[in-house]
Image (tube, rainbow, N blue to C red):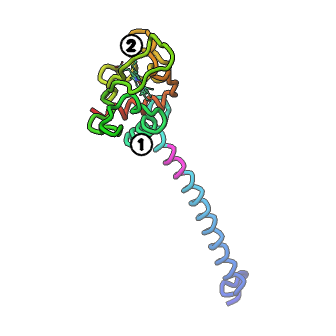
Amino acid sequence: MRGLVDLDAPVGGRGHRDFRLSQGLIFMTKFKVGGVIAATGLAAAMMTMLSGCDGRERVDPEVTRARGQYLVEKVGMCADCHSARGPGGMFDLGQWLQGAPLGFSPTVPMPAWAGYAPGIAGLHNYTDAQAIALLTEGKTLNGQPLRPPMPAYRFNREDAEAIVVYLRSLN
Ligand code: HEC
């Protein structure tokens, strides 16, 4: 039968299929866009969950400890003074950062020279805030500067926190 619209005609049929195809593409595109928006939203939600109230990203504690270890061992070289050495001048790892008499003295008179670097493993005499104040601003418990040759470090807060995490992990 031939009416106004010939359903069997190839043009009409193709047109219909094309219409469905394009609708499908539009749907897929919408889905994709929607998916991207949904994924972005999810990522944002996860970031919010992972970050603390101060808005800073929360870092894996093990990563923080490893950074602290790096700063202590490879940057601050704290062991040079704070760790005892055994025969041959090698560090006694059993007493790592547990304090040591200095193995050197100044070549010019320095009345304030400290002959002994106390133990810093565990940081038992310090609260976190006190230790961070010392490492970032040189603020000590009694208000007096630490005596030489303790360097007057000015670590940034994040690095000081990492150092504290590492030192606390030692006993
Ligand atoms: C060149 C030697 C030297 C180096 C390197 C050094 N220190 Fe010290 N540190 C000392 C001496 C000496 C003292 C004692 C100062 C005093 O008695 O006034 C001291 C004191 C301290 C104290 C105070 C301890 C207490 O019981 O009050 C802390 C904490 C400390 N150092 C941390 C560190 C850290 C962390 C590092 C590495 C990032 C470091 N020091 C590197 C020599 C050193």
Q: Which amino acid type is marked by label 1?
A: Val
Secondary structure under the numbered disc 1 in the rendered image: helix
Is residue 150 found left or right of 125 in the rendered image?
Answer: right
Tell me if label 1 and label 2 are in contact, CB under 8 Å: no
Task: Say which quarter of the image contains residue 164.
Answer: top left
What stretch of residues is rendered in magenta? 38-44
Select label 1 or label 2 by which is in front.
Answer: 2
In the picture of the structure, the residue carrying the numbered disc 1 is 63
Secondary structure of the magenta portion, mostly?
helix
Q: Tell which of 103 and 149 is nearer to you.
A: 103
- Quick one: label 1, few (<14), some, or many (20+) residues within 10 Å? few
Q: Is residue 40 magenta?
A: yes
Look at the image and tell me whether residue 59 can be seen: no
Q: Is residue 33 magenta?
A: no
Q: Which mark is residue 141?
A: 2
Residue 159, percent across and down? Answer: 48, 32
Residue 80, percent across and down? Answer: 41, 32
Seen at 37% across and 28% down, the residue is 82
In the rendered image, the vertical position of residue 86 relative to residue 138, given as above or below: below
> How many angstroms separate mark 1 from mark 2 (CA)?
29 Å
Q: Tell which of 2 and 133 is nearer to you.
A: 133
Extreme bottom residue here? 1
Quadrant holding the N terminus: bottom right
Mark 2 CB lies closer than 8 A to ligand 1: yes
Residue 103, percent across and down? Answer: 38, 27
Quadrant holding the C terminus: top left
Seen at 56% across and 51% down, the residue is 37
Residue 49, percent across and down? Answer: 43, 40
